[in-house]
Image (spheres, rainbow, N blue to C red):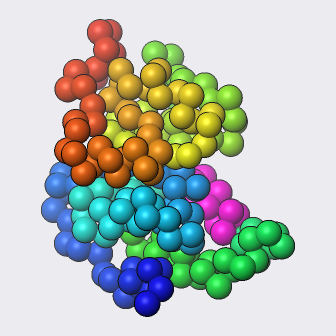
Amino acid sequence: MDRIALNAGIAPAARAPGTATTCVLDSNAVLDWLVFADPHGLQLGHAVMQGRLRWLMSPPMHDELLDVLGRLDRLPSLQRWSSRREHAQRMMATWATPVTAPPPLPPALQMRCSDADDQIFVDLALAHRTPWLVSRDRALLRLAARLRPWGVQVVTPQRWATRSATHEPATSPHPPAGAPG
């Protein structure tokens, strides 16, 4: 059976407030899970569907992911995956937790990403102090050391799966000195 089909038809688990760890998934991490069925992406998706992770998504992130999924139909190099677009959109609608885009962050939290398109992921992760920002994007991964003191771990899906399996703590319990609330 196709691994993608294993995710279909699963309803969200009842989520008690505060029981799931929040995360931000960039578009390539979502593709790994919902389109390419990468083993590490599937582990990440399984944690979302089990209610261990709560995937936060702002409207700009939603729009970007819809655009990326639309490329499965438009780009010849991705058309072999186009049959998975609708499934991925349904899963996104089921499992992503919609949140508003954050207002401008205080100066101490403003971390500029070298890829302006990825700034939405950085800002949301910092605004919500999500323990996980999962990406394979180099521009986001380069920010890992700068985000870590704020409690945000920037990791690849593979690294997330490794840490999750070993129960390695995701964050420091304390924000950097002088950090706002």
- Decide if residue 21 is in sight here: no
- Decide if residue 17 is in sight here: yes
Residue at 62% of width from left, 37% of height from top?
138
Is 165 on the left or on the right of 154, as rendered? left
Nearer to the camera, 43 or 177:
43
* Magenta residue check for 124: no
Outermost residue toward the top in this view: 177
- Looking at the rendered image, the quarter that the C terminus falls into is top left
Percent position of residue 42, x then y: 41, 66
Location of residue 41 (image quadrant):
bottom left
Marks counted in the figure total 0
Residue at 27% of width from left, 31% of height from top?
171
Dominant SS in magenta: helix
Relative height, residue 145 to residue 154 (above, below):
above
Percent position of residue 124, x then y: 47, 41
Which span of residues is magenta-colored? 59-69
* Magenta residue check for 66: yes
Residue at 34% of width from left, 52% of height from top?
161
Residue at 66% of width from left, 69% of height from top?
69
Relative height, residue 15 to residue 161 (above, below):
below
Percent position of residue 75, x then y: 82, 69
Nearer to the camera, 125 or 137:
137
